[in-house]
Amino acid sequence: MNLIAISIVTYNPDINTIRNTVKLCNHFGLHVYVFDNASNNFSKLEEMISKFSNVHLTKEKENKGIAYALNSNFSLAKADGYRWLITLDQDSIISEEFLNKYLTVIEKMNNEPCITIICPKIIDKNINEVIFGGDGKYEEITDAEKLITSGSCIRVSGWQKVGGFYNKLFIDFVDTDFQEKILLANLRIIRCNEIILLHSVGKACNIKIGPWVIHCSNHNGFRRYYMVRNRLYFYRKYRSYCEYCKTYCRLLMGTIKICIFETEKLDKVKAFLKGWKDYKKLIS
């Protein structure tokens, strides 16, 4: 039985980080699906991966986005008979302990078909703070915004049941939309706080002004566009109009904060306006 495999999506990745991840997975006998979104350094990535027999590399001629790449890796895993796929970002840092604990937890939960996503505690390595996770060993997740795809282990049959990831989202809120569909299908999401993943959220930093701490994610204009567009889409589709309005106000206040504390202000303001204009195109 093929139980677990690994998914990595790359776009101009750090080759050493990918090498370390692939090497560790090879040590554990885990198959790795790498989907590359037209990286400028693809030849170096391909050369490195050719030295490992446990990797399937998919190359695209253009950037298809995170959702498309994840769906491709899940389709391959399904065809190869895998039941679970651990989804990693290209900058995810994993350890032997991370994989050992996942293997133990998945063996335990594999026979509980309603459990569809197992996710770790997430620590933002830029600011060394826990952004998702608690103190107990396990916790039931009922809010789709309380986890991310990076580091999560997803049951392949659950991915298929809800129709996979929404390709048009491209990047940002791809995971939240998918997780909302999982919850709406009465499937379960469990966090194991003993599994820990170091993750980067943009180029986050905290700015102290007297007794206040201002958090800045420092995403560029490209990412800001998708963050605004897709968040508005999500709240318009799945939440009440009141919650949508609150989200719009929060995004507007966030843009004001960007104008005060971050760089590339004009690009990010334009991204906000374009995202606000375009989100309705995603509503079918």
Image: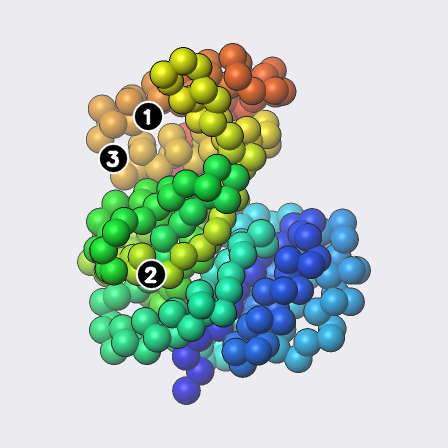
> Mark 2 or mark 3, which has the lower sequence index?
2
Question: In which quadrant is the C terminus drawn?
Answer: top left
- Secondary structure type for disc 2: strand
- Density class for disc 2 (Cα within 10 Å; few <14, some 14-19, many ≥20) is some
Farthest residue to the front: give it.
210
The image shows residue 200 at horizontal and vertical percentages of: 52, 44
Q: Residue at x 57, y 48 (%)?
A: 65
> Mark 1 or mark 2, which has the lower sequence index?
2
Q: CA distance from mark 1 to mark 3?
A: 10 Å
The answer to whether the residue labelled 1 contacts the one labelled 3, judged by CB atoms less than 8 Å apart, is: yes
Choose mark 2 or mark 3, whichever is in front: 2
Choose mark 1 or mark 2, whichever is in front: 2
Q: Residue at x 32, y 71 (%)?
A: 105
Image quadrant in which you'd find residue 21? bottom right
Farthest residue to the bottom: give it.
1
Mark identifier at residue 247: 1
Looking at the image, residue 173 lies above or below residue 14? above
